[in-house]
């Protein structure tokens, strides 16, 4: 599993969901199947199936004891089934071992664990028409997590919120680290194949404060084409930040090196760079401690980009910029390979997670 941090070239997320509380074990009881399969390491190319009657599927991860974001794609073989996927300390051999977990439930919905039950928003699933991609932002010291899912049956489908600030399963309320991803099928038949695990052993999120330092990360070289797209979770902890996040060729050390960028302004609004000035197609007021998904589509041939911002909790989407020009100093840029962020002399912090290239 790979935890993604930062951006590609566009960032997307959430639409509204139906609230469907699903009891503690669903129609099929959670049985403690003890025949755990051998734990094995994961990389981005691995695909493996958890199947009914074969016991637990476990994969070792780098130790995580702080904040991290992880993602993977799962393909259910049938509907309904009862399959649980989540994170534990050491190989899991019972449901009680999982701290943060999501479930393909017998109700034909995907849901997430919250303390002693499955609850929160739920997402309907089918089979045979594309995978379901999960992203979990997990805070191990706080024993809390948030979870999103999207059905990849079409290009650039948005993530939808399964649950925000959910509690680890009750039995794992004091766990100090997570180093395993496990899956189990608790129904009489069916399987879930999971692939494209992404996990960042450095906790997966980048935090910037007004310390005068630029922070950046490279993103997938596949983006060095005529167009590009990326997913980025971003949040600030103040309503009067002066923070910028953008894409560049190489790791930038100045604003002039950003080709395309979005700004959290000190007056509580957001805008985007258009040539030699900041502008916006719509007024967007941001709130502190709220997840935003900033989506950028870049045309590297024309030197233009568009950006939308989605409130990951309330599901509102704003078209912030359409066909804006790259920053004047980068008008001839035909390649971008880093995402960077900077907080410019204001209190508070900017945090980014979940960068990926599609």
Image (cartoon, helix red, strand yellow):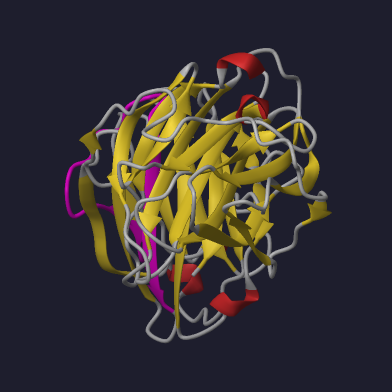
The relative height of residue 356 versus residue 223 in the rendered view (above or below) is above
Q: To which quarter of the image does residue 356 belong?
A: bottom right
Q: Is residue 83 visible?
A: yes
Residue 165 x, y percent position in the rendering: 45, 23
Q: Is residue 48 left or right of residue 146?
A: right
Left or right: residue 287 versus residue 116 is left
Looking at the image, which residue is at 42% across and 23% down?
A: 24
- The magenta span reads 273-299
Location of residue 305 with respect to 11 vertically, above or below: below
Q: Position of residue 289 (x, y in %)?
A: 42, 24
Q: Is residue 342 magenta?
A: no
Q: Residue 62's quadrant in the figure?
A: top right
- Residue 128 as seen in the image, left or right of residue 172: left
Residue most toward the left? 282
Q: Measuring 65% from the left and 36% from the top, which residue is drawn there?
A: 87
Give yes or no for residue 282 being in the magenta stretch: yes
Q: Position of residue 261 (x, y in %)?
A: 44, 56
Closest to the observer: 304 or 277?
304
Does residue 242 appear in this view? Answer: no
Please indicate whether residue 132 sits to the left or right of residue 18 in the image.
Answer: right
Q: Nearer the viewer, residue 174 or 12?
A: 174
Query: How many marks are shown on the rendered structure?
Result: 0
Residue drawn at 68 percent across, 45 percent down: 56
């Amino acid at each position: 599993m790979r935890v993604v941090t930062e951006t590609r070239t566009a960032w997307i997320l959430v639409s509204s969901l139906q609230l469907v509380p699903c009891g503690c074990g669903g129609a099929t009881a959670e049985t403690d199947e003890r025949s755990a399969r051998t734990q094995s390491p994961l990389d981005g190319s691995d695909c493996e199936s958890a199947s009914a009657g074969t016991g637990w599927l476990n994969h070792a991860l780098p130790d995580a004891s702080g904040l991290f974001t992880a993602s993977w794609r799962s393909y259910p073989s049938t509907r309904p089934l009862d399959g649980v996927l989540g994170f534990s300390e050491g190989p899991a051999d019972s449901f009680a071992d999982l701290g943060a977990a999501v479930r393909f439930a017998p109700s034909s919905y995907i849901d997430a664990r919250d303390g002693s039950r499955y609850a929160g928003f739920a997402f309907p699933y089918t089979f045979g028409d594309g995978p379901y991609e999960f992203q979990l932002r997990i805070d191990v010291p706080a024993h809390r997590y948030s979870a999103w899912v999207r059905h990849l049956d079409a290009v650039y489908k948005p993530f939808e919120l399964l649950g925000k600030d959910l509690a680890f399963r009750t039995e794992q309320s004091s766990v100090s680290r997570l180093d395993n991803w496990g899956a189990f099928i608790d129904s009489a038949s069916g399987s879930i194949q999971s692939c494209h695990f992404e996990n960042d052993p450095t906790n997966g999120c980048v935090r910037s404060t007004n310390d005068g330092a630029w922070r950046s990360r490279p993103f997938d070289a596949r983006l060095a084409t005529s167009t590009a797209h990326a997913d980025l979770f971003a949040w600030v902890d103040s309503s009067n930040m002066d923070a910028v996040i953008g894409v560049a060729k190489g790791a930038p050390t100045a604003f002039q090196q950003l080709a395309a960028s979005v700004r959290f302004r000190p007056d509580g609004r957001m805008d985007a760079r258009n040539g030699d000035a900041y502008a916006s197609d719509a007024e967007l007021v941001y709130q502190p401690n709220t997840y935003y998904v900033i989506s950028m589509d870049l045309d590297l041939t024309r030197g233009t980009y568009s950006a939308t911002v989605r409130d990951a909790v309330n599901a509102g989407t704003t078209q912030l910029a359409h066909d804006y020009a790259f920053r004047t100093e980068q008008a001839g840029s035909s390649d971008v390979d880093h995402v960077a962020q900077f907080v410019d002399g204001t209190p508070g912090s900017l945090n980014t997670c979940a960068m990926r290239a599609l």
